[in-house]
Image (tube, rainbow, N blue to C red):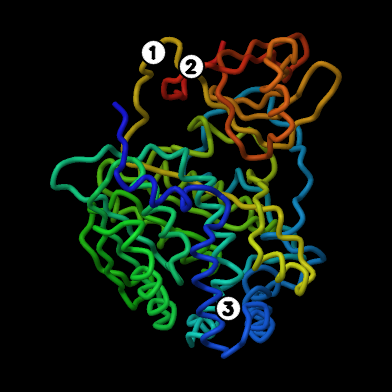
Amino acid sequence: MSYTSPLATATASLLTPAYPPALEAYWLRQAQRETRALSDRDAIQRLLPDIRRLADRFTTARPSLPPPAKTPGEGTPPASVPSAPAASPQPRPPADAASAAVPAAPAAAPAPAASSDPIYLRTARHAIAYSLYFAPLTHARMNLVLPELPLRAPEPRRPYRILDLGAGTGAAAWPALARAAAVGHAALSLDVCDTSRAALRALHETFLALRPSAFPTALLRTHLTSARDLDLPPHAYDLVILHYVLNELPPDEQLALLEHAARFLAPDGILLLCEPLVRAVGDRLRAWRDYAMDTLHLHLLAPCPHELACPLREPCHAVRTFPLPRTLQILATALHRDLRHLAFTFLALTPAPAAAPTSDTAPLAARLVASPTFAKGQTLCPACLPDGSFARLQLLHRDLPAAVRKSLRTLERGQRLLLADATPLGTPPLRRAHLSTSPVVPTKGSLP
């Protein structure tokens, strides 16, 4: 059964990776008011020292990391072809052996530690500077991930409850609210926590500006506390968000916060983790994945199309492009950064086991783990498959309509492909694949 939201039109601009003009205009107005500038470009220029400080802190100059040659979080994408995988999928190691599956980080790049100053946004000026730079990037990441998640269907007298841990100024919360509204949830509830009073004040003011047109029935509660100390009813939230939070903590606190966040999940809820691609800690996502499944007994929704051992030998991540809003175009030039690519990792987890296939013809979901390559008459897609194996999927152009062949050129690392089949060819890991045309929900079933 499909659900159509009466708020679909109002929230449509919040559901695409492109940054909504209304949100961009809102933050530019705040910048002009804060700096008393005559134009938005002048306001950006006056805020540039604050923007540079925050951008450096969260993307290049973390306390225990030497500045790398290239921006690892939002800048130039890394090499796209993974190392040769294992010959066949293996069962996941037990929880106490999870660390053995993770290659040691290079000695020259130790893991980042938490800052000695946990309150990163102390004033309204800081909150505005932070939002001008980071909010469009966060919005794009969330709207690249959220469409894959099976949000529960609306139920009478049961609001859709969202909890954003370490919410900052709310950039991850607005796409989540919009997504819930778009699938039919009229009653929405948002809880957010952060240690910055200025950030929560900015979030509240933004909520009041968006609420009348986008989600008029939504309720907001703010909590001035750290995510680790948040005390709310357990098993009560449909979506719990940890966006760019875990990597800011010392390693010994990350699993504790992951467990703390999981206790807030409703039985059919979703825990969404999103983290930057920092090579020194990129494979930490694998340890979080194993801990969540083995110790917390959660199940994977994405990005992995299976719950077996990861067949890759490098950090699994997405590298996606999105249209830069005008503000980021100005900042990219001023800060000398390439912001066109989003390099990030994510995990979507749930207490509920995967649903059984709804049909024998249900498509199989494969994840692109590197950029595709193009040859005469074919496209080769390095992908992780539902049977736990790595394969190079051969898509023959002769099997595809012209419009689909053209769209293959836009495939990016981290995207999901829905397959009708993937037949092994003579040279492993090559498989001949056909794209699915089935409209039913994909499954994590086995491949031939």
Q: Residue flagged by tag 3: what amino acid is it? A: Ala
**Residue 66 percent coordinates (x, y):** 75, 73
Instruction: Decide which of 149, 227 is in the foreground and name it.
Output: 149
* Residue at (37, 75) in percent of width and height: 205
Alpha-carbon distance for marks 2 and 3? Answer: 45 Å
The amino acid beneath tag 2 is Ser
Picture disc at residue 134 = none
Task: Judge from the rendering whether residue 361 lies leftward or rightward of residue 405; answer left or right.
Answer: left
Say what secondary structure mark 3 lies in. Answer: helix
- Mark 2 Cα shell of 10 Å, populated few (<14), some (14-19), many (≥20): some
In the figure, 276 relative to 117: above or below?
A: above
* Secondary structure under the numbered disc 2 in the rendered image: loop
Disc 3 versus disc 1: nearer the observer: 3
Q: Which of pointers 1 and 2 indicates the residue nearer the eye?
A: 2
Which residue is nearer to you in this view: 412 or 383?
412
Asked if the residue under mark 3 is in contact with the one under mark 2, i.e. CB atoms within 8 Å, the reply is: no
Q: Residue at the location (31% across, 42% down)?
A: 5
4 with respect to 361 (left or right)? left
Outermost residue, left side: 157
Q: Quadrant of the N terminus?
A: top left
Q: Is 98 on the left or on the right of 217, as rendered?
A: right
Mark positioned earlier in the residue sequence (1 or 2): 1
User: Where residue 338 appears, x then y in whole percent?
Assistant: 76, 61
Q: Which residue is mark 1?
A: 359
What is the quadrant of the C terminus in the image?
top right
Q: Look at mark 2 in the image and give the residue it sits on.
A: 438
61 or 387, which is in the foreground?
Answer: 61
Reading the image, the residue beneath label 3 is 129
Q: Quadrant of residue 149?
A: top left
The front one of 246 and 409 is 409
